[in-house]
Amino acid sequence: MNLLFDSIATGLAEQDFAITDQFLSQPEVEAIVALPEFQADRTSFKKAGISKQVQVKEEIRGDYIQWLDKATAPGAVTVYLKRLDDLIRYLNRNLFLSLKDVEAHFTVYPPGTFYKRHLDQFKQDDHRKLSVICYLNNDWKPEHGGELRLYLPGRTRDVLPEAGRLVCFRSDRIEHEVLPATRERLSITGWMLDKEKFLV
Ligand code: OGA
Ligand code: MN
């Protein structure tokens, strides 16, 4: 893991983002996708809103989400959340950050849905420092679309939502969008915070 963590720290330090394959192994991804939340119960996911006011604007984003609770998350998800906690400790030590917690949700983009260009941190007082997205889609092919498009200085970078791949970027700096896909697109989306989630 330390090699993976090191490549994430280097990417963040040098270019404000990092793309890392195999952050979750194939069996770890399969254990998450096999959960009832992803198999039967997807209809209970909520239509995602744009801000804390839970506004639903389909012309901006069309994904469905379900927030995760560390205390009650199934084991397969806990494996991932613990790994993010380890990553937080690693980044704090190596990049002198003061990350304290992570908040995360399951995300489903039905075919044809998207999330237009945006920044994850839109208010000055936002505690989201790093965005972290791990994809859960086996055999994703370029013709399926669904790229995460990162807007970087003078260029864009498209990332396919391949199973096990983690994308991590500065929430206040990197604008990005999700392009429509021809198949369902699953992920766990999260943010590393500079305060503890349940402390205000
Ligand atoms: C988001 C987001 C990107 C992705 O949920 O804010 O930008 O690739 N997700 O799913
Ligand atoms: Mn985003």
Image (cartoon, rainbow, N blue to C red):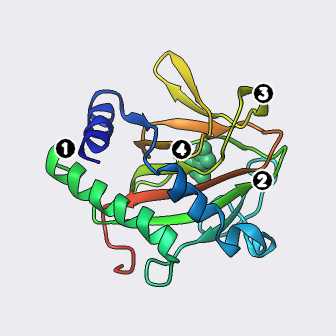
Which residue is at 54% across, 28% downward? 151
The structure residue drawn at horizontal position 45% and vertical position 43%, both measured from the top left corner, is: 22
Identify the amino acid type marked 1. Leu
Task: Please state if 187 lies on the left or on the right of 3 as rendered.
Answer: right
Q: Which residue is mark 1?
A: 95
Residue 49 lies left or right of residue 149; in this view the side is: right
What is the three-letter code of the residue carrying label 2? Answer: Gly
Q: Mark 3, mark 1: which one is toward the viewer? A: 3
Q: Which residue is label 4 attached to?
A: 119
Q: Nearer the viewer, mark 1 or mark 4?
A: 1
- Looking at the image, the residue that sits furthest to the top is 154
Identify residue for label 2: 62
Asked if the residue at label 4 sits under 8 Å from ligand 2, the reply is yes
Label 1 and label 4: CA atoms lie apart by 22 Å
Q: Is residue 121 visible?
A: no
Kindly indicate whether the residue at mark 1 contacts the one at mark 2 (C-beta within 8 angstroms).
Answer: no
Disc 4 residue type (three-letter): Leu
The front one of 140 and 19 is 140
